[in-house]
Amino acid sequence: MTGGPDNLSAPAWARGAGWGQAFFQGVKRLPSTPVLVVICTFIGFGALARETGLTLGQAAFLNFIMFALPNQVVLVDQIAHGATLATAFFAVLLAGVRLLPLTVSLMPLLNAERASLKWRLPLMAHFIAITVWVESMRRLPQIPSNLRVPYFFGFGLALMAATLLGTVLGYSLSANVPTSLAAVLLFLTPIYFFLSLIIVVQTHMDKAAIILGLILGPIFFFLMPGFDLLLAGLVGGTLAYGGARWAGKRD
Amino acid sequence: MGGQAGLDLGTGIWPYVFLLGIGFLATEPWRYLGVFLARRVDIESEILKWVRAVSTALVAGLVARMLLFPAGALAEVPLLLRLSAFAIGALGFFLFRQTMIIGVALGAGAIFLGQYIQ
């Protein structure tokens, strides 16, 4: 079970290719429409980080250590509004749960059970985020299993570099462009997140969670600022989950 | 609203220590847990369904918050324009078979041009 037989429909470059070539092929996958959108949203992150009062170094550092945009935005948002380190930590923790199913489903494709890969596992895991996941789930099955890891690292590293560039660009741009354009940069994040949530909707529970979150977020912001994201997530998510179970049992 | 003082991260090396402590330590464990659980857990298990709902609602709450109570330059755009641009982007996204770039571009274009129309 390595995600499909090797070489069945392998791309032409894979024939006799080594690690270097596979890595380079991963890098070459970078220019694409989804990646362009992602870079735009990291420009938005850079702009937001500056508005929050982070330095450029801190913004880039966050981008590097986290490499998961929703978590980064939650953290920056909590720094701007949040009361304590603990609430910030738990808000980021809850937002990050999204990474778990991505990693669980991607690891088998990377032949992660092989002993020789063990030391690389934490490093590989760090690059798992939604864009890398989509690209990997789509391309890796066609790539011979011995070339998947370098391909994955090629794409992941290239995307990391591109997002760092986006962050730096957004940070410096927002200081130098007219307000009307700076507003556009800050608008990119909410619209992108919203559409990303819609695109992965699978069940009524997902839809209910989106709607409840949209409603509860602002309400809790008035009632208990600082805890608003945590509560919107826990209350909205639990209601959506409970409602879906209840509706399922009735059928 | 939302005028409470921001979290003080200190100076020098301290902001980086805090950012690492919150950002990395609250994010990376999910990836490691995913590696550990790969092939050991059913992705459709009830607990994972619940965490997906919580995480989805949290991000949706963030979206509403960023739109209704935005930071910096976006706060100077009237609420009605923010909501209209958001609706235009979402509409374009659905009309063009859920194409992300069309939704984002239409929304961004609307909020940019809208500021000059008023």
Image (spheres, coloured by chain):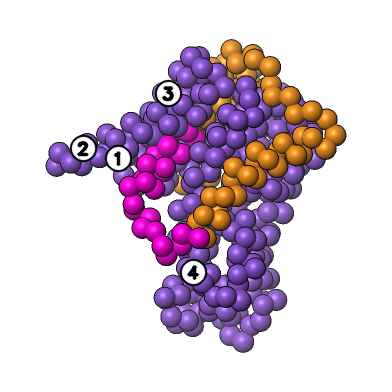
N-terminal of the pair, mark 2 or mark 4, is 4
Report the quarter where the C terminus of chain A lies: top left
Label 4 chain ID: A
Marker disc for residue A109: 4
**Amino acid type at mark 4:** Leu
Mark 2, other Cα within 10 Å: few <14 / some 14–19 / many ≥20: few
- Work out whether B5 lies above or below A201: above
Question: From where the camera sits, is residue A146 visible?
Answer: yes
Q: What chain is the orange one?
A: B
Marker disc for residue A247: 2
Q: Marks 4 and 1: which is nearer the front? A: 4
Asked whether the beta carbons under mark 1 and mark 2 sit within 8 Å of each other, the answer is: yes
- At horizontal 42% and vertical 23% (from top left) the residue drawn is A216
Quickly name the residue at label 1: A204
Structural distance between the alpha carbons of marks 2 and 4: 35 Å
Structural distance between the alpha carbons of marks 1 and 2: 10 Å
